[in-house]
Amino acid sequence: LVMTSTGELPTALSIFLQGDVLLNPGVQFGDGVRCVGGNLKRLYVKNASGGVISAPGAGDPSITAQSAALGDPIAPGSTRYYQVYYRDPDLTFCPTPQGNTWNVSNGLSIGW
């Protein structure tokens, strides 16, 4: 499984986030809404290329291996939630009140 985020700034620093709880409703997070919660893990940190970022990449551990290495083994039948948050230094992106210097992608739910 490879996750991809598009529509970011060309070389945005991006963090793939995993959680074991769906936040519904989500919470304001930078210029977006975070819907991933619970036991949070930063799986991968990478820079986008042309506004696109994917993980895991060549040489990276799989999502399940990385999660286990971070202390959160994924049992068969369990669900995890994923989002990417990334640097976006444009403080005028959101209307008043102005946002922050990061944004977040749409969320993804995966049943393992």
Image: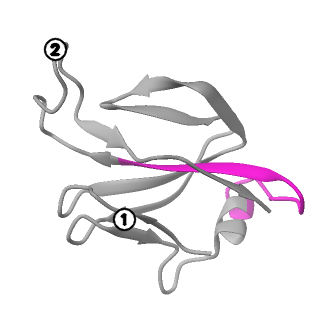
In the picture, residue 88 is in which quadrant?
top left
Q: Is residue 38 above or below residue 111?
A: above
Q: Is residue 50 above or below residue 16?
A: below
83 sits left or right of 28 in the view: right
69 sits left or right of 74 in the view: left
16 sits left or right of 62 in the view: left
* Figure quadrant of the N terminus: bottom right
- Range of the magenta residues? 68-85
Q: Which residue is mark 2?
A: 96
Name the element at disc 2: loop
Name the element at disc 1: strand
Magenta stretch holds residue 75:
yes
Q: Is residue 61 above or below residue 21?
A: below
Q: Is residue 103 above or below residue 4?
A: above
Q: Amino acid at mark 1?
A: Lys
Q: Nearer the viewer, residue 112 or 11?
A: 112
Q: Which residue is mark 1?
A: 46
Eye-nearest disc, 1 or 2: 2
Q: CA distance from mark 1 to mark 2?
A: 30 Å
The residue most toward the bottom is 58
The residue most toward the top is 97
Magenta stretch holds residue 45:
no
For the point 24% across and 64% down, the residue is 51
For the point 51% across and 85% down, the residue is 59
> Could you tell which of marks 1 and 2 lies nearer the N-terminus?
1
In the picture, residue 14 is in which quadrant?
bottom left
* Figure quadrant of the C terminus: bottom right
Q: Amino acid at mark 2?
A: Thr
**Tally of numbered discs:** 2
Tag 1: Cα neighbours inside 10 Å, few (<14), some, or many (≥20)?
A: some
For the point 24% across and 28% down, the residue is 100
Residue 110 percent across, percent down from the top left: 70, 57
